[in-house]
Image (cartoon, helix red, strand yellow):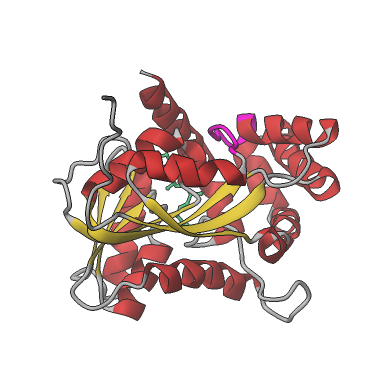
Amino acid sequence: MITETASRKAQAYYEQAEAMYVSLYGPNFHHGYWPLPDDGTTYEQALDNLTDQIIDRVGAGQGDRVLDLGCGIGGPAIRLARTTGAHVVGVSNVATQIEQATARARTENMAGQVEFEQADALELPFPDESFDAAIAIESLIHMDRAPALSEIARVLRPGGVLAAADFCLNAFVTPERRQVLDRYRALDSLSSFHRLDDFPPMLRDAGLEPVELLDASGHVERSVKMWWERTEADLENLTNHYGKQELSDFIGLFDDVITHGGPEYLIFTARKPRTPRPAPDHA
Ligand SMILES: C[S@@+](CC[C@H](N)C(=O)[O-])C[C@H]1O[C@@H](n2cnc3c(N)ncnc32)[C@H](O)[C@@H]1O
């Protein structure tokens, strides 16, 4: 099955890339968000800002049960639980991420409010309509969107909101950028890039009504420079871990993304309608 292969590929990628991710991002495996391109926001603050962009949009509160699809090592799930009072269930397909996230929740005294479970996002081990809301921060980038969004719609209660950060294409793709995108896909085990305009019909087909689609590329583009600086600062450790060739592949990709551009960065929210869409009339 294609989806199973994609999940296994992403799993193998994260098992191998974990040391680099921890070095580049700490507990948040995602881009940073800068309110203004050259404000004084630090990288750590920018990483939390991105989580907060998603938390603000999902609108969860005390007593809500929230799914974090593709939870990494738990930073965003724990922050969401702490700041909103919601109960958060994080799932990832990587066992070591679940171990680290669970340990982090315990260390931060949040174990009663956050739980983590190893599962494939395309076959969630939860009943229909068992969550009030869901977040997916840079996890859909690895998945076939149609089945992943349908699975989220299945577990959301009617009226429940999904807030997500994803990649998309929203600007002209030059041949140079096409090459960068292809390398990005291959190196980071990414799924296809979709045009921003494809998201509304894709969401509707999955049973979700689009609420907001924001091209946030300008707010996150400093992240790549940060990865560059972090990699340089931790070069010896990362070279020992990955070997020179693999590390220079990643550094080369960062350079090319800075020069030619990578995918655009999409923040979107969608809601599961309270009443299902009527079936098409085939009479
Ligand atoms: C870029 S990381 C983002 C992690 C987290 N959302 C964050 O912001 O820190 C992508 C996450 O998606 C997870 N993932 C990718 N494909 C998955 C799948 N099919 N099922 C479950 N998790 C998946 C990865 O293991 C990883 O935890």
Magenta extent: 186-194
Q: 29 or 268: nearer the eye? A: 268
Q: 223 or 192: nearer the eye? A: 192
The count of marks equals 0
Magenta stretch holds residue 37: no
Residue at image position (46%, 66%) is 54
Q: Is residue 221 left or right of residue 15?
A: right
Q: 32 or 237: nearer the eye? A: 32
Residue 68, position as x, y percentages in the image: 34, 56
Residue at image position (28%, 31%) is 281
Residue 236, position as x, y percentages in the image: 70, 49
Residue 199, position as x, y percentages in the image: 51, 45
Residue at image position (78%, 37%) is 173
Residue at image position (40%, 28%) is 8
Q: Main secondary structure of the magenta part?
A: loop
Q: Is residue 210 above or below residue 123?
A: below
Q: Residue furthest front?
A: 283
Q: Is residue 128 left or right of residue 26?
A: left
What is the quadrant of the C terminus in the image?
A: top left
What is the quadrant of the N terminus in the image?
A: top left
Q: Is residue 200 above or below residue 77?
A: above
Magenta stretch holds residue 187: yes
Residue 169, position as x, y percentages in the image: 66, 43
Q: Is residue 157 left or right of residue 231?
A: left
- Residue 121 visible to an observer of this rendering: no
Q: Residue furthest left?
A: 127
- Residue 84 visible to an observer of this rendering: yes
